Image (cartoon, rainbow, N blue to C red):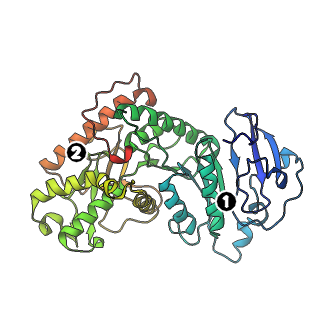
Amino acid sequence: MDDDVYKLNPSYTKTCLHSSSSQLSFLSSRVSRRRNCAIRPFHRVQPTRISCSTAPNQVQSPAVQTQDPKSKSDCYGVFCLTYDLKAEEETRAWKKLINISVSGAAGMIANHLLFKLASGEVFGPDQPIALKLLGSERSFQALEGVAMELEDSLFPLLREVKIGIDPYEVFQDAEWALLIGAKPRGPGMERAGLLDINGQIFAEQGKALNAVSSRNVKVIVVGNPCNTNALICLKNAPNIPPKNFHALTRLDENRAKCQLALKAGVFYDKVSNVTIWGNHSTTQVPDFLNARIDGLPVTEVIKDRKWLEDEFTETIQKRGGVLIKKWGRSSAASTSVSIVDAIRSLITPTPEGDWFSTGVYTNGNPYGISEDLVFSMPCRSKGDGDYEFVKDVIFDDYLRQRIAKTEAELLAEKRCVAHLTGEGIAFCDLPGDTMLPGEM
């Protein structure tokens, strides 16, 4: 940060009431005189955290003065003045506020996702939300910019925004935690090294969720390697049901539907029952055996079995790399769409006879897959945020062999992070480098 910012004791946290909606860079001493700020003790010794609400400010703040910390509200800015859902329930069908925490909130995926959440596209046009955005010290200024854009967009359903770098504060009372942030893989870094570095991040976030989030929080892990990161996270959150943790494989499912539709010459809404099995890596298994096109088995519509086993499968496994080569960047927009799809699959009843893919805890699965992994499998939901495994799936030798390969990879990754899951000394014997381009 610049030299002219406030130097605060890390055992204190600073909260500010803005004098105008454009003043989000509240660390600058040049504008500090126009804000009403108070310093209050903070029990844990942690990095300074800034919290702010983003909405048009309708009042002018008075000259700087010291407030009694005990009188400070948990809200800031205009939300302290206008946020009263109980009163609004008399004229509007408001639902209870949902707290959504997002890590990596200054990144490109979040930049697409946050506006979908705030607009009502995800949870519905009558569902107010609060966004709690987690960044890092290095990305904090960009995080302020994200909050400014949300503020300027005037979303009526966005009732609160907080930004910070401390997961123990950002995850407070979270009902949904969308864990996007992860360290990219640098030049010369082995996959084992990436597992360890990102594993430490997700171990800490799991502990924070365990300490301060809702006991029924739903967690979607996007940061790669997402399956094993999700396993690390749930192992460090013993008070949260393991089945509440998901690793995002919905983008892979969406890609598979697109390719099957193109080959069959139909629109992709005719494609259903597509499963991605296993790891979000190049060992993932796009299942054409159980998939359907316009209600018929894919193998009856697309009779080229060799294309299905080879070209189709490889296209899905390597689609992200091809996109990066052409586009020059990773698939941030389509990833954000797939996060929306993943959430909707859990809060909307699954259409009769269909299912969706998500990476979930394998304990109790009916497919013979090793327990104590996070493995992408076919699931159905009643729309209550929960899910159940699909039982009416079929297997052949080809599918079982492919599933065994991705299972072996996840077992090896699990051994590689044993020190982060409380299972002893780590031992890395990864069967090969199956890195996805998005990890770079």
Q: Are marks 2 and 1 in contact (CB under 8 Å)?
A: no
337 relative to 379 in the view: left or right: right
Query: Is label 1 in a helix, a strand or a loop?
Result: strand
Query: Is label 2 in a helix, a strand or a loop?
Result: helix
Q: Is residue 96 above or below residue 428?
A: below
315 relative to 143 in the view: left or right: left
Pick the front one: 29 or 256: 29
165 relative to 6 in the view: left or right: left
Task: Count residues near mark 2 (Cα–Cα under 10 Å), then give few for <14, some for 14-19, many for 20+.
Answer: many
**Label 2: which residue?**
403
State the image coordinates of residue 309 (x, y, percent, origin top left): 14, 54
Pick the front one: 188 or 81: 188
Residue appearing at x 34%, y 32% in the figure: 190
Task: Count residues near mark 1 (Cα–Cα under 10 Å), then give few for <14, some for 14-19, many for 20+.
Answer: many
Q: Is residue 201 above or below residue 50?
A: above
Kind of residue sitting beneath label 1:
Glu
Residue appearing at x 75%, y 56% in the figure: 76
State the image coordinates of residue 353 (x, y, percent, origin top left): 29, 66
Kind of residue sitting beneath label 2:
Ile
Residue appearing at x 85%, y 49% in the figure: 71
Pick the front one: 26 or 66: 26
For residue 379, say whether it is visible.
Answer: no
Work out which quarter of the rendered image holds the C terminus and state it.
Answer: top left
Pick the front one: 409 or 239: 409
| Mark 2 vs mark 1, CA separation in Å | 43 Å
Residue 148 tag number: none
The residue most toward the top is 425
Q: Is residue 90 above or below residue 226?
A: below
First in sequence, mark 2 or 1: give its number: 1
Camera-side mark, 2 or 1: 1
Residue 160 tag number: 1
State the image coordinates of residue 87 (x, y, percent, origin top left): 74, 70
